[in-house]
Amino acid sequence: MLYFLLPAYNEEGNIGALLDKIRALSGQLPRYRVLVVNDGCTDATMERIRERDGLMPIDVVTHETNQGLPASLRDGIAAFLAAASNETDVLVTMDADNTHEPGLVPQMLGNLQPPHDADIVIASRYQRGGQEIGLSLSRRVMSRTVNLMLKAFFNIPGVTDYTSGFRAYRAEALRRVAGAYGPRLIESTTFSATAELLLKLRSVGVKAREVPLVLRYDQKRGQSKMRVARTILDYFRMMVRVAAARRRAPGATGR
C-alpha cells in the first residue's frame, strides 16, 4: 500500500492541482491513499480537498491551529505507521504547494525494490538532471550551503540533497527510527525537520538512494512560508542536537 503525506497550510491555490496530478497517475501506482495534514488552514484549502472527495482516497489529520511543518510531519508519520498493515508499505512525502511533480513517484518506488532495495529514496535537486526553477538566488545559495554542511558532518552514501522534502520511505525504516527516538523523532521547529529526520534515519543504518528532481517553484502560487534567518539558526541547533541524540538513542548505530 502506498500513502502520500501532504502537510498543508493555506495551499488553496496549489493543493488541487497536486491532487489532480496524483489521481492522473493511478494507473501507474499500486493501491494508494492520500494523507493530508490540515495544519490550521484558514483559507479554502479544505474546500479544494473536499471537491475531490469520492474521486480519490483522501484522509485528513486536522490541527485546529497552525503548528508548523515539524508537527505536521510528526503527526502524518504517526498516522501512516498506525495505518500501515505491512512493513513494505511506503510513505511518500511531498510539499503541498505543487512544486514537486508526482510523476517521479513510480521511479522512486522502483528504487525501493530489488535490485536496489533502498529504505529511503530522495528526489534530489543535485543529482545529474536535477534543477531548481523559479527559486530565488538567496534561497538557492542557502540550500546549497546547508546541504554541503550537512554532507560534511553527516555523510550518507548516495545522498546529495539532505533538505528535499520529496521522499519515499519504507514503513519498516520509519518504524525502526521511531522506535529508536520515540517522542524525540522530530524536535526541530522549522523546515530543518526534514533534514533532522534523515539524519536520524542515518543513525539506524538505512540504505538511501536518489533520483533527479526538477523543483518547479515557478508553479507555486502564494508566498513562501520559510523565514530564512530562523531556519539557518535552527539547522545549526538541529545538527548539535542530532549529534548528541544519536549517542543516546538505544537503536542507533552511531555511524
Image: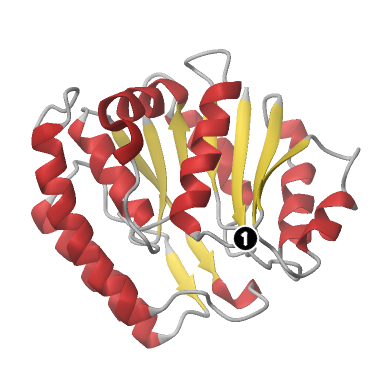
Is residue 128 at least partly visible in the picture? yes
Residue 78 lies, in percent from the top left, at 51, 33
Residue at the spot 19% in from the left edge and 62% down from the top edge? 237
Amino acid residing under circle 1? Thr
Furthest residue toward bottom: 137
Residue at the spot 45% in from the left edge and 71% down from the top edge? 132
Residue 71 lies, in percent from the top left, at 48, 51
Residue at the spot 68% in from the left edge and 77% down from the top edge? 221
Q: Is residue 215 above or below residue 4?
A: below
Q: Is residue 209 above or below residue 119?
A: below
Furthest residue toward front: 64
Residue 123 lies, in percent from the top left, at 44, 50
Q: Is residue 201 left or right of residue 54?
A: left
Q: Which residue in the structure is indicated by mark 1?
A: 65
Q: Residues within 10 Å of mark 1 (few under 14, many from 20)?
A: few
Q: Is residue 95 left or right of residue 201?
A: right
Q: Quadrant of residue 5?
A: top right
Classify the position of the C terminus by image quarter.
top left
Q: Is residue 184 above or below residue 250?
A: below
Classify the position of the N terminus by image quarter.
top right
Residue at the spot 39% in from the left edge and 29% down from the top edge? 174
Q: Is residue 39 left or right of residue 22?
A: left
Q: How many badges with numbers are in the image?
A: 1
